[in-house]
Amino acid sequence: MKLLFIKYKSVIRFILTFLLVYILFSVLYKFYLQFSDGSNFYPDYFTHLVGLQSSDILNNLGYATQILPHEAEPSLKLILNNVYVARIIEGCNGVSILILFTSFIIAFSGKLKTTFFYILAGSVLIYVVNIIRIVILSIGIYSYPKQADVLHEVVFPAIIYGVVFLLWVFWVNRFSKLNKKHG
């Protein structure tokens, strides 16, 4: 048993670090959501911000866009040219994806400064890609309403998770301590 632990020490360290960081950030985010009453920013600050930024881009692209609080659930209605095309829920704000990304990078950490700046730059990139994803998804659903399920459940998750995966691969190959040991 001890030999197995020694042999797979780096794998075990990665898994434990990933899980601890992921659980910690997820719990903190859950507290944030629990205490976010939506009185100033409905349904919560991050979801509200993502909705506003998506709406601004859509308006700049020539679509008459409205973001309205949903009456029946904690979400925002996204309306393009007077057509209700989507709802923006808490899961659309990208925070859970950022938690996943950050947990992986910390678990495969490199130098502290490099790790910090990679998490910062990667998070900004993921956030921007998420906004663009919502914009393109909204236009796609508006233009091709019969394809809404495929666009929402297949194409656009593939985009955001594909970006995260590429960032992980780049990190592991260029900056992680693990690569330095085997390089």
Image (spheres, helix red, strand yellow):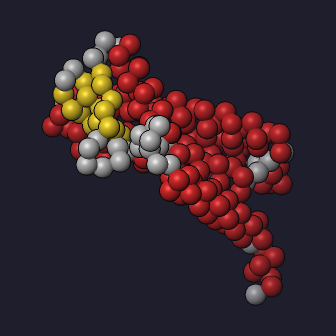
Q: Position of residue 38 (x, y in %)?
A: 44, 44
Is residue 120 found left or right of 127 in the rendered image? right
Looking at the picture, tell me which residue is in the foreground, 127 or 72.
72
Q: Position of residue 96 (x, y in %)?
A: 52, 50
Which residue is found at the position 31% from the left and 33% from the top?
Answer: 68
Which residue is found at the position 42% from the left and 47% from the top?
Answer: 90
Residue 146 in sight from this viewpoint: yes
Q: Is residue 180 above or below residue 79?
A: below
Q: Where is residue 41 in the image (x, y as percent from the top left)?
A: 46, 37
- What is the quadrant of residue 159 in the picture? top left
Residue most extreme to the left: 146
Is residue 72 found left or right of 56 in the rendered image? left
Is residue 70 found left or right of 108 in the rendered image? left
Which residue is found at the position 45% from the left and 26% from the top?
Answer: 53
Looking at the picture, tell me which residue is in the foreground, 140 or 162.
140
Looking at the picture, tell me which residue is in the foreground, 72 or 179.
72
Residue 132 in sight from this viewpoint: no
Which residue is found at the position 28% from the left and 41% from the top?
Answer: 70
Q: In this view, does 61 lie above or below 11?
A: above
Q: From the image, which quarter does the N terminus lie in?
A: bottom right
- What is the quadrant of residue 10 in the picture? bottom right
Residue most extreme to the bottom: 1
